[in-house]
Image (tube, grey):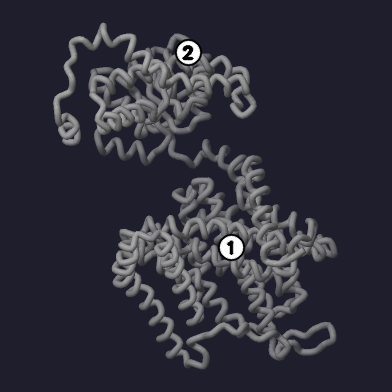
Amino acid sequence: MDGIWFIAFVYLAAAVLAVPVANRLGLGSVLGYLIAGILIGPGLGLGLVGRETQDVQQVAEFGVVMMLFLVGLELEPQRLWEMRLRLLGLGGLQVGLTALLIAAGAVALGRYWGLALAIGLVFAMSSTAIVLQTLSEKGLTKTEGGRACFAVLLFQDIAVIAVLALIPLLARPGGWRDAAGHAAAGAAPAAHGTATLVAGLPDWGYALVVLGAIAAVVLGGHYLSRPLFRFIADSRLREVFTASALLLVIGTALLMTLVGLSPALGAFLAGVVLANSEFRHELQSAIEPFKGLLMGIFFITVGAGIDFGILFADYATVLGLTFGVMGLKAAVLLGLARLFRLPAGDGWLVALSLAQAGEFGFVLLAFCVQNAVIPTALARTLSLVVALSMLLTPALFILYERLIAPRLRTDADEPAPDTIDEQGAVVIAGIGRFGQVVNSLLVAAGVRTVVLDHRAEQIDLLRKLDIKSYYGDASRPDLLHAAGIAQARLFIVAIDDQDRAVEMVEYVRRTYPQVRILARAYDVGHMYLLKKAGADVALREVYHGSLSLGAAALRRLGFHPYKVERMTRAFRRHQSEGLDGMYDLWDQDPDIARNLALQAHIRAYVGSLQDALNADRRDLHDRTERGWTPPPKGFAQELDDEA
């Protein structure tokens, strides 16, 4: 069975089945898509797809263009200028050194220098699609390592333009020869019949056309996009706005293709131009679903396109090349990370996340074959190396997360903790947005506190505001001892890391049983874990804020303030009793999905909430509401003027 409906069904079914399982196992969505492709591909899988994989991949690569557009929307021109050193320095050195070292290795193996340099340039590129997607999923895009990765990837996308111009010059005179000894230069397939605006132009004419295209994107995005999107938004037809957003990205990509530039680079440029637009968020929401789906299909095609026949025929060469290229790139990136003074953890993140070859490798290999720079048979082997390196990338992220990052938390190159020269009645671990409120209230009440936080930049900021605090990891027993935990009356845990919070509570409860422990909980499950670890009080961080907002909403809806206060108190009391009643059931099996008794208790608890609020109002009405008068007319308008 074939046809477009069957192919679409197979691709979507593979994604729907494989990706949730991969996420459940902690492997990430990218590896899930790749595995899905292998399962439906002709190599080791069911052979449900095959011949059409390359055609689908060409369409799915547009997801990379959309992703660069969205990245550009997040970057204002000022921020782009601020990262110029890493963009040109780190990115430029990575591409140059990697290409030269791989080329040197190929020359040492007897390859022609032009062919060797072409191979080096192919493997110098990394996978923008995999790396940015994975960094985003794992929340690493805002870290120093994440920003350095983005700078390198952006330089690579720009460098592809120069590499495409260079490749025709690298062909051996007469071209490479096939097994029969015939020159293949003239036999290479002609460039696909894409229309172009620069064919036959002299160099100065080509430069003018390219500059004109870039100027059209910048000026059009700055002066024309706002009135255009405002006009479209006034129609109040969301599907038309979505179509216009797609038209913008596709039009920019088409213009860049016509002048011989990378469509991804053009989309990125358009995104940067629109970063300050008031329609930025609408554009993001319109493009995001298409980007995610196309990126997923792209990864599936990579998995389905792996030619395991070549691997089984010469697995030593293929695996040797794969691990050799990834090891060399990681070593180069790690050395450059040290040169640019990245912290150790961020340096390893850059080295491992960018060690693979990328989707541009497929494009460059096809272009090399067309221009008789690399023989077809060798290009197939190198394409397999590119695909395998992409397949191994999620495993490198897992290696970084589970082995390297935890060990580097106590790396010796981190700043030494402060010397704690005072003690107080209360020791507070964490001085973020939660801990600051707690500390401010206690200090204002005349209570002496000792505050510890492991984020040096946060401590520096607070010192500028004359808020005394100490840099140091509160999970270290020596620092807690120096802070006077043995004499303290209270220990308050206000850090973001849920696991470390539980570990701190367990340690203090075990070592200093006389100290009362108050802890910030992320949710109900975390609250139970903290109570089990020994916390005397564990409060959910957003519970009281949410309750206050709900009460404000009832007042805005016209409920009398007294009634709102009564309902809020009844809700709080009902919550407290319900959570206490569920703790024993939770303790028997914390996995709610399997704990049928807990599920039944939660259903009964939710169902009883409205009855509890109404019962509270009926039972206590006569005894406590007698002194209250009905709300005056127009009280709702007065409430609107509050705050």
Among the two numbered marks 1 and 2 on one chain, the one whose residue lies closer to the N terminus: 1
Q: Give the numbered dot on residue 126.
A: 1
Which residue is depicted at the point 65% across and 60% down?
328
Which residue is depicted at the point 63% across and 70% down?
122
Whether residue 643 is visible here, answered yes or no, is: no
Quarter occupied by the N terminus: bottom right
Q: Residues within 10 Å of mark 1 (few under 14, many from 20)?
A: many
Whether residue 239 is visible here, answered yes or no, is: yes
Picture coordinates of residue 503, whole percent (x, y): 53, 24
Q: Nearer the viewer, residue 56 or 215?
A: 56
Picture quadrant of residue 548: top left
At numbered mark 1, what does the secondary structure look like: helix, strand or loop?
loop
**Residue flagged by tag 1: what amino acid is it?**
Ser
**Residue flagged by tag 2: what amino acid is it?**
Tyr
Q: Which residue is mark 2?
A: 512
Q: Nearer the viewer, residue 222 or 424?
A: 222
